[in-house]
Image (cartoon, helix red, strand yellow):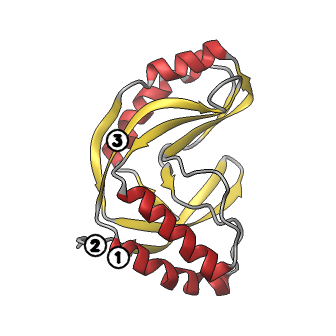
Amino acid sequence: MALEVQQEARQELDRRVSGLRGRLPRARWVDLGNVHLTLLFLGETGEAAVAGLVEALRPAFARCPALDLQLRDGGTFPPRGPARVAWVGVEAPAALQALHGEVTAAAVEALGIEPEARPFSAHLTLARCSEPWKRDATETWKAALAGPIGPAFRVDRGTLFESVLGRGGARYSAVAELEMAGSA
């Protein structure tokens, strides 16, 4: 379950990241045309369960107002020590945290999954480090992605994606779109 990133913001992100790739250690880079803000990763979900999941998620999105988001600042996981994942943050109103909680509760109820123990952190994963990046690489990443990235944008719907892994990374297709309050 995810929120899509507006094209202009993705283009600015692509401009900044493409200039960095040659200056950083090897990594498996996410296709920025597919980048989205994941609210909840569901893993393999049987086709028969999808319709019930969508109906369980619909009220959570209908209660949430459209959200104004801003890509901002690069970081890495883990935050200290050699990096395994490089990301860019998403600045959002408190309603995003509430939406995440409702989406998680709906998926737990509909699918019987275990919620993640980690707290939600609004970010876009951009690279998985083939070998953990050392401090100089993480500092280069953070410096190049400091501050706002691209224009702020409004999101008025959530998208349930199906991802299929293959050569060249995951391919995503929208299974359902769920409108937020005030969208139309």
8 or 110: nearer the viewer? 110
Residue at x 58% of width, y 15% of height = 23
Element under disc 3: helix
For label 3, the residue is 9
Q: Locate residue 135, reporting x and y percent.
A: 65, 15
Residue at x 66% of width, y 32% of height = 78
Residue 174 visible in the displayed image: no
Element under disc 1: helix
Residue 161 visible in the displayed image: yes
168 or 123: nearer the viewer? 123
Q: Quadrant of residue 155?
A: bottom left
Q: Is residue 32 left or right of residue 131?
A: left
Q: Is residue 97 left or right of residue 168?
A: left
Mark number, residue 181: 2
Q: Earlier in the sequence, mark 2 or mark 3?
A: 3
For label 1, the residue is 62
| Identity, as a three-letter code, of the amino acid under mark 3 | Ala
Query: Alpha carbon of mark 2 to alpha carbon of mark 1: how far?
Result: 5 Å
Where is the C terminus found, in terms of image quarters? bottom left
| Identity, as a three-letter code, of the amino acid under mark 1 | Ala
Query: Alpha carbon of mark 1 to alpha carbon of mark 3: how far?
Result: 25 Å
Q: Is residue 45 left or right of residue 57?
A: right
